[in-house]
Amino acid sequence: MKLNHLVESQQLSVEIILSLFKRADEFRDSADKPLTGKILAALFYEPSTRTRLSFESAMMKLGGNVISTENAKEFSSAVKGESLIDTTRIISAYADIIVIRHFETGAAKQAAAVSPVPIINGGDGSGQHPTQALLDLYTIRKETGRLDNLTIAMVGDLKNGRTVRSLCYLLGKFKNIKIIFVSPENLSIKDDIKDYLMRHDVQYEEQTDLNKCLPLADIVYMTRIQKEQMTAGEYNKAAGIYKIAEENFKLLKSSARLLHPLPHVEEINLPLKTEQTDERVAYFRQAENGLYARMALLAYLLE
Ligand code: CP
């Protein structure tokens, strides 16, 4: 069944995922403009570099136009007390599709419930970030050639990290996946994700020693400690515990790939030369893949 909105990763079937990847590959070398005349509204209540700009670039490359509020919390009528529901109803009269990033979990779902045009969740609080998961999975396939038979170490703030949550939901759709969760004690993965993985026969374990896990992983998925989602006390307890630097980066298999949704701060500290020359560093290619994955999604929802 065709999707009207994308608010959570679980909506994406394997069939849709594979067709989006095929389309994303095609868009790399195509000058087609299938969305000429269409308008994307980017409604962002939280900061963003990659998600907002890659969606905007994707829409323009497809021939469409963009209207954008980069700081809706401060510069939209939310300041005057307008609800997200009313804002969505208004913007849906101005645009053919809306990408929303919001600080509240469930915001995109609320918007989708009242919107006559497609809503894409560009990240909602500590809920989900399904297009990040889509581009992460697209990157995993491009880099390793497969989506089954993978061991993935997920490292960092697994409690608040919406990208990890969305990626787990997608990985649950593939075979022989093993996930190793490595997090500070106070930021471990939540039970709803563990329950989902159990129900979908995904093996997982929780570990504390990152260096023991690095040689086992096909993919190391690092994440930032989400300072903005916690108290100073919680942050101080968790910051700096897990890092990839020169001394432990060499523990990765030669075929492994280091991914990160970005932005990264102290949890990755590799020399520029390593980032530029070691093919195991995949996070800049990952961010670029986001452009093509989002082009494919916009075309899917609007054509
Ligand atoms: N990965 C990601 O969502 O990046 P931005 O916050 O820059 O959009």
Image (cartoon, rainbow, N blue to C red):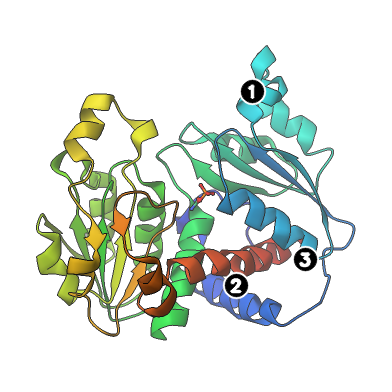
The residue lying furthest to the top in this view is 80
Q: Is residue 303 visible?
A: no
Mark 2 residue crowding within 10 angstroms, few (<14) / some (14–19) / many (20+): many
Q: Which residue is mark 2?
A: 20
Q: CA distance from mark 1 to mark 3?
A: 29 Å
Residue 170 percent across, percent down from the top left: 41, 64
Q: Earlier in the sequence, mark 1 or mark 3?
A: 3
Quarter of the image with the C terminus is bottom right
Q: Which residue is mark 3?
A: 61
Q: Which mark is residue 74?
A: 1
Q: Residue at x 82, y 69 (%)?
A: 34
Quarter of the image with the N terminus is bottom right
- Numbered label tally: 3
Query: What's under tag 2, amino acid-wise?
Result: Leu
Using residue 147 as the reference point, say whether residue 14 is left or right of it.
Answer: right
Q: Which mark is residue 54?
A: none
- Residue 28 sits in quarter: bottom right
